[in-house]
Image (spheres, rainbow, N blue to C red):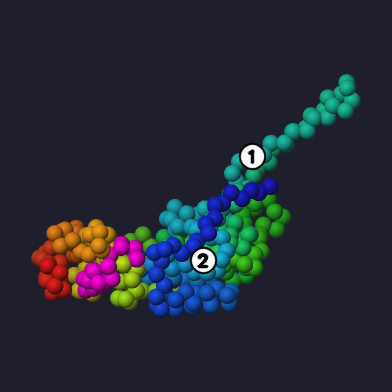
Amino acid sequence: MSVTKVEVIHPRPDGGFVETPRISALTARAIRYRNAGYPVHLSGPTGCGKTTLALHVASRIGKPVVLINGDEEFNTSSLVGGQLGYRWHKVVDNYISRVYKSEESMSKVWADERLTAAVKHGFTLIYNEFTRSRPEANNVLLSVFEEGILELPRAYGNSHNYIKAHPEFSAILTSNPEEYAGVFRSQDALLDRMITIETGYYDEDTETQITCARSGASREEARKIVRLVRRLRESGFCELAPTLRSSIIIAKTTRDPDGNINGDAFKQVCVDILSPKIGKGKKGDTNPVAVIEKLLNEEGLL
C-alpha cells in the first residue's frame, strides 16, 4: 500500500513580475526544450533570478508544480519516499455463535515523496540548486530523464518496483557554479541528459525594470542604483558579487513616497549593503567604504 501526501503549488506571475525581451527569450528556449521532452537546467550565479525564471516557465507550462530545494543531507528516500509506518488490519468472524475467530495482520505503508508524486501524476518538478544535494542522491534521476522510468526500492511493495513517468511530467533544475560553497560537482551522465541554459546576470535594462517593479522606486532612480551595483560587480574588488537583490534592497530602503532616493540615507545604506561584498585585497589594504564612496562620486550620487 502507498500514500501520497505532497503539496503542490500553482505559480502565477504577480503584479511585480517583469518580462523583458531577455526574459521572454530565455522562457521560450526553456519551453521549446521541455516540449521536445528534455529536462531544462538553468545554470548561473546566485541572485541572477534562476528560481523566479523556473517558476515563470512552470506557469507557462500550466501544470501543478512540486518544488525541491537541494540539500547535502538528501538521500534517495528524500526524493522518492520511504516507509512511513504500519497499517493494521483485523477481521473478526463470529458467524457461528459459539465459535469466535479473529485474524490480524500488519503491513508497512509506503509514502511517496515529491519526485515520485511528480513522475506519477505529471506535475512539473522544480529542483532548485540540485547540486547542493550529494550526487549519489540524484542518481535516481538518470532513468527518469533517459527512459522515463522511476526505479523504486523493494520496500515500495510493487512487484515491478518502478513507475512509468506520466506523459506530462517535466523537470526544471537550477544550479550555481561549482566554485560556490556547498556545491557538489554533478555527474556527467546527469548533465548529459539535460539541456543547460546559462542564464548569467540580466542586462542593465532588465535589472532596472525589475528593481523598479520590486521596490517602487522611479525608473530613473532604479537605473542609478543598478548602474552603481553593476559597476561594483565588474570592478574586481568583490569577493562576492553584488546581485540584483542588492539593487532592490537599496532601492526599497532609500526611496521616499514619490519613488525618489533619500539622499540622507543613501550613502549609509550602500555601505551597509555593499561593503560586505568587497574583499580586503591580498595585502589587506582595500578599504570597502572608500571603494563605495569613489563609485558614488563617479556616478554623481553623493
Q: Who's the residue at 89% across and 25% down the image?
A: 96
Mark 1 belongs to which amino acid? Tyr
As drawn, which residue projects farthest toward the front?
258
As drawn, which residue projects farthest toward the top?
98
Q: Which circle's residue, 1 or 2, is located before the other in the chain?
A: 2
Name the image quarter holding residue 131: bottom left
Q: In terms of secondary structure, where does tag 2 sit?
A: helix
Give the class, few, some or many, for how many residues have Cα within 10 Å of label 2's Cα (few <14, many ≥20).
some
Instruction: Report the residue marked by disc 1.
Output: 86
* Residue 183 at least partly seen: yes
- Relative to 15, is 169 on the left or the right? right
Q: Who's the residue at 58% across and 62% down the image?
A: 123
Instruction: Report the residue marked by disc 2.
Output: 59
Q: Who's the residue at 52% across and 74% down the image?
A: 31
- Relative to 77, is 211 on the left or the right? left
Kindly indicate whether the residue at mark 2 contacts the one at mark 1 (C-beta within 8 angstroms): no
Nearest-to-viewer mark from 1 and 2: 2
| Distance from the alpha carbon under mark 1 to that under mark 2 | 38 Å
Residue 280, given in percent of the width and then of the height, sits at 15, 64
Question: What is the magenta segment's predominant secondary structure?
Answer: helix
Q: In terms of secondary structure, where does tag 1 sit?
A: strand
Q: Who's the residue at 44% across and 52% down the image?
A: 73
On whether residue 266 falls in the magenta region, the answer is no
Name the image quarter holding residue 270: bottom left
Mark 2 belongs to which amino acid? Ser
Give the class, few, some or many, for how many residues have Cα within 10 Å of label 1's Cα (few <14, many ≥20).
few
Give the quadrant of the C terminus.
Answer: bottom left
* Residue 155 at least partly seen: no
Q: Which residues are magenta?
A: 213-231
